[in-house]
Amino acid sequence: MAHCINGNVTWDDVYSCSPNAQCRNKATYTNVTARLVYGDGKTCLQLTNCQDVYTAGINESGIYTIKPTGWPGSPFPVYCNMADGGGWTVFQRRVNGSVDFYRNWTSYKEGFGQIVHEFWLGNDKLYYITNQDNYQIRIDLVDREGTPHFAEYDSFRINDENDKYRLSAVGNYSGTAEVLNTVNNQNALKYQFNSFFSTYDQDNDMDTRHCALDRQGAWWHHTCCRSNLNGNYFASVIPSITDFVGDHSLSVGTTYQDLTITSNTPR
C-alpha cells in the first residue's frame, strides 16, 4: 500500500496513486490522504492490467507490475504499450527468431522468453487477465518489406486450463492486415472461435491432422489454416504466420509482431 517518505507519497509498484496525494501526520502513525487519486479518492488500488496503469496517468510504454483479479500467485511484470489509445497489455512479441516458440503445453501455460524482447506471457496469466473485464485484441505485424499492418477484434477472451484455454470470445475485425491476404479473409482469428489451444504434445484441434505438429506452432487451431502466430521463425521471416491473413498464403512473410489486449472500458 501507500507510504509517506519524507513528506511524499510512495507506494508498491503493484498499486497506483495520484502524485497529488498528500501525507498527513497522525499522533501514532503516518497516514496517506489521497486527493484526486485513481480509484475512490481515498485508497491506492491494485493494478490489474495495463489499462489501470494508463488510467493512473502513466502514458510511457514499459514494464509494469500487475495482479489480475483472482490471480492466485504473486504480482508479475508485463509490458504495457501506451500507443494507439494506451493501456495495451502485450502477451506475445516476436522480433528476430532468437526465442524458440515450438514448445510444449507447460511452457505455454507458464510463459517463456524475455518480456523486453521475444516472449509468450503464459496462458494462465492470459486467462486471468481476459476474464476480469471485457477485452479487445490488437495484432501488429510488419511484412518483409518493412510495412506495418494491424488487426483488431473488439472482444477477446480465453478459458482456463480445465477447458484447454478455449478461445471463448473473438469479436468483429477492423484494421489493415487484410491487404496482406490473397483471399481477402480478414476473419482468420474469428474462424478459430471456440477452438482449444494445441501444442505439439497436446492435440486439441478439430482436424484429422495434428495442426501444432503439422504447422510447427502452438495456437488455437481449428483446422490447420487461417492463423498460426506462434509458427517457426526462420530466414528472417515467419512464413507460417501468413496463415493469419490468408488460407495457406505462404507468399507473404512477417518479420515482427506484437499481440496485445486492452480493456473495453471507455478510455
Image (cartoon, rainbow, N blue to C red):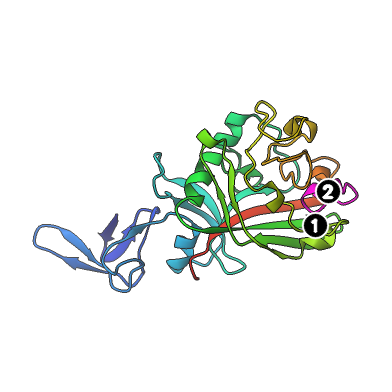
Give percent across and percent down for residue 244: 77, 50
Give percent across and percent down for residue 163: 54, 36
| Left/right of residue 259 with respect to residue 43 in the rendered view | right
Asked whether residue 197 is in view, the answer is: yes
- Residue extending farthest to the right is 251
Callouts 1 and 2 close, C-beta under 8 Å: yes
Q: At 19% across and 68% down in the image, what residue appears?
A: 24
Residue 70: give its label: none
Q: At 29% across and 58% down in the image, what residue appears?
A: 2
Question: Does residue 156 lie above or below 215 as drawn?
Answer: below
Question: Main SS of the magenta segment?
Answer: loop
Q: What element does badge 2 sit on? A: loop
Residue on which disc 1 sits? 185
Residue on which disc 2 sits? 247
Asked whether residue 189 is in view, the answer is: no
| Left/right of residue 103 with respect to residue 216 in the rendered view | left
Q: Is residue 244 magenta?
A: yes
Give percent across and percent down for residue 221: 70, 40
Q: Amino acid at mark 2?
A: Asp
- Quick one: label 2, few (<14), some, or many (20+) residues within 10 Å? some
Give the magenta part as a residue range. Answer: 242-253
Q: Amino acid at mark 1?
A: Asn
Q: At 76% across and 58% down in the image, what residue appears?
A: 186
Residue nearer the viewer, 132 or 17: 132
